[in-house]
Image: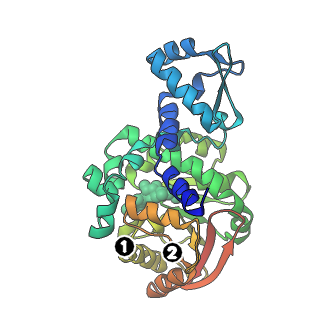
Amino acid sequence: MSSSDRERERLAALFDIAPSRILYALSTLGVADRVPAGGIPLDELAAALGADPGRLARLVLAAQTLDVVRVGPDRVVHLTEAGLLLRSDRPGSLRAEFSDNSLFTAWGPFAECVTTGRPAYELAHGAPVFDRIGRDPRELATFHEHMRMRAMQLYRPLLPFLLERCAGDVMDLGGGTGGLTELLLGHSTTLKVTLTDLPEVVALVPGELARRHPGRVATVAADLREGVPEGYGTYVLGSVLHDWPDEQALRILTGCARAMGPDSELILLERVLDETGPDARRMGDIWMMAMTGGQERTASQWAALAAAAGLALREVHHGDGELSAVVLGR
Ligand SMILES: C[S@@+](CC[C@H](N)C(=O)[O-])C[C@H]1O[C@@H](n2cnc3c(N)ncnc32)[C@H](O)[C@@H]1O
């Protein structure tokens, strides 16, 4: 095979969205949740899901190529180790992420997003992502379950640094339904964390969090663009500023700078991109362009944005994961 043929094959394989759509269908239908440890016959699985047996069998047989299920000669379906991650009850479950369908269907007008500067999500769905999901309780719950699971995975490598760096009471800004808050509280016996987010999101923070950590957690409904509560030692913005273009991100950072005391620090948990070289995290940047109109940033872009808000970049801590901690102070 010539190198040009190999390149043709490599690019052609990128055309195929079927694998992610298969995982979406398995997750949305709750297939993995119906497969017990000893497996289940295909027909019984279809009946349990209320699905057409022929089509469900084709879906499951194709899913074997993704190594999430195995079907024996007896037509009994078993989950592989990867397939277990599609179960709702699994730590680090990816079920909510693959069920988050409006994020996939938003990609249709992506090329137009590049030319017009309007997020593909808005072009596809007619409203900005947080406005639209805020109006649909099911989408809101799925999105935030996805975020909570993501937080548990992506912030874990930064946890030792965070626990050492957090001083005084902590404010988890745009904290969603508490993935990061839970991680911090679960690994410290002294930290107190207040989580803010939009009212409809704060309403979804599980009551269990406060029961597990009595007196150490509070929630406040607030719009970050309108200002930030004062009086905290450490402010954390986990995967929030990448949702916004520079102008809005600066507005949020300026609100933080106003709220911070002379010794307060603001820690951003974000992908810090390589300045120019190939960097797989650039895919995250494209997701932001498409979904929210935001962007991932390099260290020099973070420093410039911080300076514009009257803050200095004190440190960038790269853990061994995808995200870094960017520490800002006054
Ligand atoms: C990408 S999610 C990150 C959630 C959480 N920090 C985490 O890392 O899992 C962005 C969060 O910003 C919140 N958000 C969006 N617009 C906001 C606003 N105007 N004021 C406060 N929070 C907002 C969303 O509700 C969402 O929880």
Please give the label number shown on residue 162: none
Where is mark 2, residue-wise? 297
Residue at the extreme left: 126
Residue 14 vs residue 44, the one in the foreground: 14
Residue at the extreme front: 1
Give SS at disc 1.
helix
**33 left or right of 229 in image:** right
**Comes first in the chain, label 1 or label 2:** 1
Q: Nearer the viewer, mark 1 or mark 2?
A: 2
The C terminus is located in which quarter? Answer: bottom right
Q: Residue at x 69, y 64 (%)?
A: 158
CA–CA distance between discs 1 and 2?
A: 14 Å
Residue 229 vs residue 13, the one in the foreground: 13
Where is residue 115, by image quadrant? bottom left
Residue 239 vs residue 27, the one in the foreground: 27
User: Is the CB of the residue bearing disc 2 within 8 angstroms of ligand 1?
Assistant: no
Q: Give x and y (percent) for residue 154.
A: 63, 57
Residue 160 visible in rendering: yes
Where is mark 1, residue-wise? 248
Name the amino acid, label 1: Gln
Q: Are marks 1 and 2 in contact (CB under 8 Å)?
A: no
Q: Residue at x 38, y 60 (%)?
A: 290
